Image (cartoon, grey):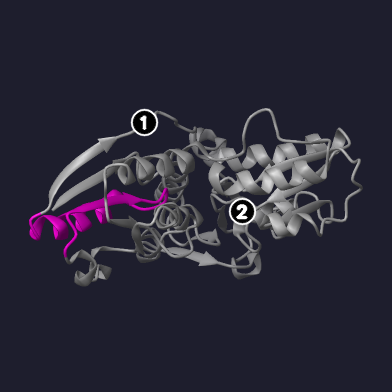
C-alpha cells in the first residue's frame, strides 16, 4: 500500500497563534483561564486544554468578574467585546488576523456605500462574529439558490465577502450567481479565503492526481476547513473520511486499496496524523510525503502577551 502524506497539512499560522496564546496565558495567569467557545475546532486540542485548567464557556456570564477570558480564533462581534468590558473581564483576543481582515472590510465597505453579501455557513462561530460587526446590514448566503432571495436593488453596489475557511472552488458558483444578478457586484482587492484552507485543498487535489482511492482527513466534525477537504475528495469520486484520531479508522476502508492519501485540517495536531500513519505502516503502508507548497506565514502575539509590561 502506498501512503501519500499531504504537505502542507495541519496547523495554520492562525491556529498556532491561538494555541500559543492559551499556553502563555496559562503560564502567566495560572488556571483557571476561560475561553469563549472552542479556541479552535479540534476535540483533542480542547480536551488537552481542559485537562490543564482551561474552562470553555459559551456565555461571558459563566466567567467570574475580573477573570481572564480569551476570545477564540474565529472572532467575536463588537457586542461581545462590550459585554466583556462591562463585566470587567481581562480579555485576550486570539482572533485570527485573517478573520480580523474581514471584520475591517465590513466597516470599510459600508462607509463606501456598498451593500454587503457574506458567503458562509449559518451559525458558524466565524460567521456569527462577522455578522455582528454590522447587525442587519450584512446579507448571508450559503448557496447560489440563496442569491435569488436577496432583498437588494439590482442596481446596488454590492461587495462580496467570504467566510475564511471556505474554498475558491465552493464559492466560485455563488460569486458567479451574485455577479450575474447584480451588475455592480465585486470582491475585495485581496481574497478573503484563508491561504491555509486553499493550500490544504490544493494538496488534496495533488494526491487525487496520484491515484489515491481513499483519503483520510484528520480533523473534528465541527471543523469547516476539515469538512471541505473531505468534500474535495468526494467530489472527485474518491472515498474520504473525517476522523478525530487513528482509532476511528475502519479496517474495511482499507480493503483492496493500494493508494491512500492522508492529510489534516488546519486545527488538527501533527501527533494525531502520526498516529494514523502508524496504523497504515503496520498494515504494510509505505509513506511518501508530497510537498505541494511551502508555508512560512507567522502571526505575532497580541500586545497583552507579547509585552511583559502589559501583563502587570
Looking at the image, is mark 2 or mark 1 nearer the viewer?
1
Q: Which residue is mark 1?
A: 293
Q: What is the crowding at mark 1: few (fewer than 14 residues within 10 Å), some, or many (at least 20)?
A: few
Sequence-wise, which precedes: disc 2 or disc 1? 2
In the image, residue 221 sits, relative to residue 144, either above or below, namely: below
The residue shown at (61%, 52%) is 90
In the image, residue 159 sits, relative to residue 236, either above or below, namely: above
**Residue 260 rendering spot, x and y as whole percentages:** 23, 53
Please indicate whether residue 217 sits to the left or right of residue 125 in the image.
Answer: left
Q: How many marks?
A: 2
Tell me which corner region of the image, top left, top right, bottom left or bottom right, holds residue 121.
bottom right
Tell me which corner region of the image, top left, top right, bottom left or bottom right, holds residue 45.
bottom left
**Residue 276 rendering spot, x and y as whole percentages:** 22, 58
Q: What is the crowding at mark 2: few (fewer than 14 residues within 10 Å), some, or many (at least 20)?
A: many
Q: Quadrant of the C terminus?
A: top right
Please indicate whether residue 157 sits to the left or right of residue 238 in the image.
Answer: right
Q: Nearer the viewer, residue 1 or 311?
A: 1
Residue 125 among those drawn in magenta: no
The residue shown at (53%, 34%) is 309
Mark number displayed over residue 103: none
On the question of residue 27 being in view, the answer is yes
Mark number displayed over residue 126: 2
Helix, strand or loop at disc 1?
A: loop
Tell me which corner region of the image, top left, top right, bottom left or bottom right, holds residue 110.
top right
Q: Magenta residues, as a range?
A: 256-284
**Residue 2 rendering spot, x and y as whole percentages:** 16, 49
**Residue 287 rendering spot, x and y as whole percentages:** 15, 46
As measured in the structure, the alpha-carbon distance from the residue carrying label 2 to the one carrying label 1 is 26 Å
Q: Nearer the viewer, residue 37 or 83?
A: 37
The residue shown at (57%, 51%) is 74
Amino acid at each position: 500500500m502506498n501512503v501519500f502524506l499531504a504537505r502542507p497539512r495541519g496547523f495554520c499560522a492562525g491556529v498556532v497563534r491561538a494555541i500559543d496564546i492559551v499556553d502563555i496565558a496559562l503560564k502567566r495567569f495560572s488556571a483557571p483561564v476561560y475561553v469563549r467557545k472552542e479556541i479552535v475546532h479540534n476535540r483533542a486540542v480542547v480536551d488537552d486544554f481542559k485537562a490543564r485548567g482551561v474552562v470553555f464557556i459559551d456565555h461571558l456570564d459563566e466567567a467570574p468578574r475580573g477573570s481572564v477570558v480569551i476570545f477564540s480564533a474565529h472572532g467575536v462581534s463588537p457586542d461581545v467585546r462590550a459585554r466583556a468590558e462591562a463585566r470587567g473581564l481581562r480579555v485576550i483576543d486570539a482572533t485570527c488576523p485573517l478573520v480580523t481582515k474581514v471584520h475591517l472590510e465590513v466597516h470599510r465597505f459600508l462607509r463606501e456605500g456598498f451593500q454587503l453579501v457574506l458567503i458562509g455557513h449559518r451559525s458558524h462561530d466565524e460567521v456569527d462574529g462577522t455578522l455582528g460587526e454590522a447587525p442587519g446590514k450584512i446579507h448571508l448566503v450559503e448557496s447560489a439558490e440563496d442569491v435569488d432571495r436577496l432583498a437588494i436593488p439590482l442596481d446596488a453596489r454590492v461587495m462580496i465577502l467570504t467566510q475564511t475557511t471556505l474554498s475558491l472552488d465552493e464559492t466560485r458558483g455563488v460569486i458567479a450567481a451574485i455577479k450575474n444578478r447584480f451588475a455592480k457586484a465585486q470582491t475585495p482587492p485581496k481574497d478573503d479565503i484563508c491561504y491555509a484552507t486553499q493550500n490544504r485543498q490544493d494538496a488534496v487535489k495533488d494526491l487525487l492526481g496520484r491515484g489515491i482511492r481513499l483519503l483520510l482527513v484528520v480533523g473534528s466534525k465541527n471543523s469547516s476547513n476539515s469538512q471541505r477537504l473531505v468534500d474535495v475528495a468526494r467530489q472527485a469520486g474518491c472515498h474520504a473520511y473525517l476522523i478525530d484520531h487513528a482509532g476511528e479508522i475502519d479496517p474495511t476502508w482499507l480493503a483492496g486499496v493500494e493508494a491512500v492519501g492522508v492529510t489534516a485540517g488546519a486545527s488538527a495536531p501533527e501527533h494525531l496524523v502520526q498516529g494514523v500513519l502508524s496504523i497504515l505502516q503496520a498494515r504494510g503502508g509505505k509513506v511518501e510525503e508530497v510537498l505541494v507548497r511551502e508555508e512560512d506565514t507567522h502571526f505575532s502575539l497580541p500586545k497583552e502577551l507579547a509585552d511583559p509590561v502589559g501583563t502587570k
